[in-house]
């Protein structure tokens, strides 16, 4: 297992579509690609879409295959997992996909004002004991407000009922526009080519008979976000 990880880390270093900056290069500092991802990394002017906590990168790669006129960047701190998506993108010569190895709480160091058009959060750790670590908490949504375009969409897919309920409460409390809300995606009748992309973990959850929850909402950059009272 250790040998496999080391070989994957070594291969990741050879991929020009993978960015792995050291911590001290981005902590409280602006990364060199901030505000310039489309032009300097992807070589175009297309919209930028992020998958946060991308794991093996199934959504990043799947979306990139469907939308050639957009740029997709998967973000995760786990390099051994990310290798799978990076390897697929390399082998399939997918040019509109990249991967960034960093912590999600450092994203403000990487992206400029209104640089990101949309965000996907697919099966994150629900962080049931520490709400402020949830990727849909006011803390993290506040980070996203710094770089998503006005009313840019945030998408959450999860198997966790508590995370779904929490996020929905937060959306309603802050009067954010909720476009799609389902507590059983695959029996909702709304599944399309995008929503039918399945991650490694999603396949496991479905095999266990778990329903998949999905929320799609607009993030208003002007709103000072409030945390649901029962979470404070």
Image (cartoon, helix red, strand yellow):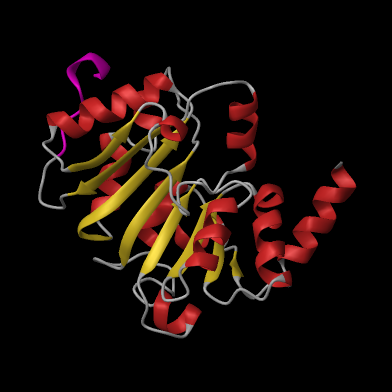
Residue placed most toward the observer, 163 or 20: 163
Residue sticking out furthest to the right: 3
Q: Is residue 154 above or below residue 206?
A: below
Q: Position of residue 226 (x, y in %)?
A: 16, 31
Majority secondary structure in the magenta region: loop
Q: Position of residue 176 (x, y in %)?
A: 15, 41
145 sits to left or right of 159:
left
Q: Is residue 144 above or below residue 229?
A: below
Residue placed most toward the observer, 145 or 171: 171
The residue at the point 65 percent across, 67 percent down is: 89
Q: Position of residue 149 (x, y in %)?
A: 23, 62
The residue at the point 72 percent across, 67 percent down is: 13
227 sits to left or right of 116:
left
Identify the image quadrant of residue 231: top left
Q: Is residue 14 above or below residue 217?
A: below
The residue at the point 60 percent across, 72 percent down is: 17
The reply to whether residue 44 is visible in this rendering is: yes
The residue at the point 28 percent across, 52 percent down is: 153
Residue 83 within the magenta-colored segment of the rendering: no
Identify the image quadrant of residue 232: top left
* Quadrant occupied by the N terminus: top right
Residue placed most toward the observer, 208 or 152: 208
Residue 230 within the magenta-colored segment of the rendering: yes
Highlighted magenta segment, given as a residue range: 225-232
Identify the image quadrant of residue 163: top left
Residue sticking out furthest to the front: 189
Residue sticking out furthest to the top: 230
Q: Position of residue 171 (x, y in %)?
A: 20, 34
Q: How many marks?
A: 0
The reply to whether residue 110 is visible in this rendering is: no
């Amino acid at each position: 297992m250790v040998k496999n990880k080391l070989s994957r880390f070594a291969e990741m270093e050879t991929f020009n579509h993978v960015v792995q900056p050291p911590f001290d290069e981005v902590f409280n500092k602006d990364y060199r690609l901030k505000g310039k991802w489309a032009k300097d990394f992807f070589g175009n002017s297309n919209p930028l879409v992020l998958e946060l906590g991308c794991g093996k990168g199934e959504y990043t790669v799947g979306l990139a295959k469907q939308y050639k006129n957009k740029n997709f960047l998967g973000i995760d701190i786990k390099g051994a997992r990310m290798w799978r998506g990076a390897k697929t993108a390399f082998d399939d010569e997918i040019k509109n996909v990249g991967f960034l190895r960093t912590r999600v709480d450092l994203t403000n160091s990487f992206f400029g004002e209104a640089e990101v058009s949309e965000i996907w959060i697919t099966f994150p750790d629900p962080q049931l004991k520490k709400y402020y670590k949830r990727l849909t908490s006011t803390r993290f949504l506040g980070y996203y407000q710094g770089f998503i375009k006005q009313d840019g969409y945030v998408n959450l897919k999860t198997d966790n009922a508590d995370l779904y309920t929490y996020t929905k409460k937060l959306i309603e409390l802050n009067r954010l526009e909720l476009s799609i809300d389902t507590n059983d995606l695959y029996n909702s009748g709304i599944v399309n080519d995008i929503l039918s992309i399945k991650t490694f973990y999603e396949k496991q959850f479905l095999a266990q008979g778990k329903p998949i929850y999905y929320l799609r909402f607009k993030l208003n950059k002007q709103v000072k976000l409030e945390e649901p009272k029962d979470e404070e």
